[in-house]
Structures are given as structure tokens and as C-alpha cells.
Image (cartoon, grey):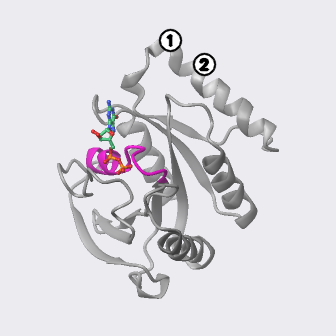
Amino acid sequence: MKINTAEFIISNSEVSKCPKEPLPEYAFIGRSNVGKSSLINMITNHKNLAKTSARPGKTQLINHFKINQNWFLVDLPGYGYARVSKKTKEVFQKFITDYFEKREQLVCAFVLIDIRHEAQKIDLEFITYLGETGVPFCIIFTKADKISRTKIDSHVAAYRKALLANNWEEMPQYFVTSSLENTGRDELLTFIDNVNQD
Ligand code: GDP
């Protein structure tokens, strides 16, 4: 898929205020600092569509971007950052869960995982939540340039093992990306294109 247009539409913390247009929607979420903004900028070919933030946990809103006039890319707040106060955390957790439970346009969630690290409890819990809620999702491994190519497969295999140990029967569809090296973009956009055409 070629990205012809990518425009910011609205930010808010209420699902009821999200755009009403019945366009398919793809949501991006992950721990703060996982590389979500960089990935969104890479996908859309914009230097600064999603704000890469020096202060993790800063963008705590649901951000809608309209792509090619025919689908929404949704940038959700990063989770699990300690500097966010407990109260703020509760609020964004509620609107994140509201989003996943109520947003009918949502077609697929992309859970971003830093490929360097062992499986983290908070990500596994979040993935379990998506499974229990019945939200279709894929995993996007980020920052693949930070480990050697030979290690990529073993890190993915370790992640699969962690998921299986958490009662998943199989590894969900996944993508390996690097925003620095611009890799994984075509696979991701082809996937979205195919789902949109189904
Ligand atoms: P966010 O908090 O999830 O939106 O993460 P950002 O996109 O702001 O990235 C967090 C940090 O990781 C920044 O310093 C980025 O430059 C860096 N980063 C993001 N993606 C990549 C990547 O693919 N490779 C490398 N080497 N660094 C990355």
C-alpha cells in the first residue's frame, strides 16, 4: 500500500468522541518508549506525525489519523510507565479498556514489543486482556536493528515460548520492524491492505 495522505483528525480521552465515520481502524499500543511514535512516523512516511516524546508517558490520549481517506490509524497511550501518577494511570486504563471494549470500528490492535527484552509481565497481561476481550491483534517487534540478525529468530522464539506458557496455543501473527532502518513497513502495510480488502 502506498501512503498518499495521512492527516491528524482528533485527540481525546473518550471513546464516544472518536470519529463517527465507519472506517476500519487499526490501533497501536505498547509500553512507553517501545518506539510507537517512531513506528507510526515510519509507516506513514511523516517525520513527525506522531510526536516522539523525550518524556515517556506524555501522550495519554487516543489519537486518530486518517490514512488515504479510507482507514484510521489510532495511536493509543503508552502503558506501564512509572512516572504517571496512579490516578492518571487509572484514568487512561479505563479509557483504553473502553476503547477496546466499545470501539466497533476497531479491526486489529498492534501490540508493540521491544525485541531486545524478555517477555514483560505487563505486556503479557495486556495480551491476555485482548484475548479475553476478543480483540484481534498482532505483535510488532520494534527496534530490530538493536540486535544482530541472527538473534532476531531466537528472541521471537523466546517470546512465543512465553506466550505458550501463558496459555496461548500459538504465536499470533507478528512483524519485525526497525524504524531506524525502515524495515517491516511493507509487510505491515500489505497486511492492513489485505484486511481492508476482505
Ligand atoms: P514511544 O514512547 O513508544 O512513542 O517511543 P519513541 O518512538 O518516542 O521512541 C523511544 C526511543 O526509542 C527514542 O529514543 C527513539 O529514537 C528510539 N527508537 C524508536 N524506534 C527505534 C528503532 O527502530 N531503532 C532504534 N535503534 N531506536 C528506536
Q: Amino acid at mark 2?
A: Ser
- Pointers 1 and 2 in contact (CB under 8 A)? yes
Where disc 1 sits, the SS reads helix
Q: Amino acid at mark 1?
A: Thr
Magenta-span inclusion, residue 99: no
Residue 104 appearing in the image: no
Per the image, label 2 sits on a secondary structure element best described as helix
Res 108 → quadrant: bottom right
Residue at numbered disc 1: 150
174 or 152: nearer the viewer = 152
How far across and how far down the image is residue 40, in percent?
Answer: 32, 51
Q: How many marks on residues? A: 2
Q: Which mark is residue 2?
A: none
Q: Whole-Å distance between the Cαs marked 1 and 2? A: 8 Å
Q: Left or right: where does residue 99 sit relative to residue 62?
A: right
Question: Is residue 34 one of those drawn in magenta?
Answer: yes
Rendering coords of residue 31 (x, y %): 48, 50
Q: Give the labeled residue for mark 2.
A: 154
Which quarter of the figure has residue 28? bottom left
Q: In the picture shown, does residue 137 fall above or below 105? A: above
In this rendering, the answer to whether 39 lies above or below 130 is above
Which residue is found at the position 43% from the left and 14% from the top? 148
Query: Which class describes the residues within 10 Å of circle 2: few (<14), some (14-19), or many (20+)?
Result: few
Q: Is residue 195 left or right of residue 61?
A: right
User: Residue 55 appears at what percent x and percent y?
Assistant: 30, 54
Span of residues in magenta: 30-43
Which one is nearer the viewer's eye here, 26 or 132? 132
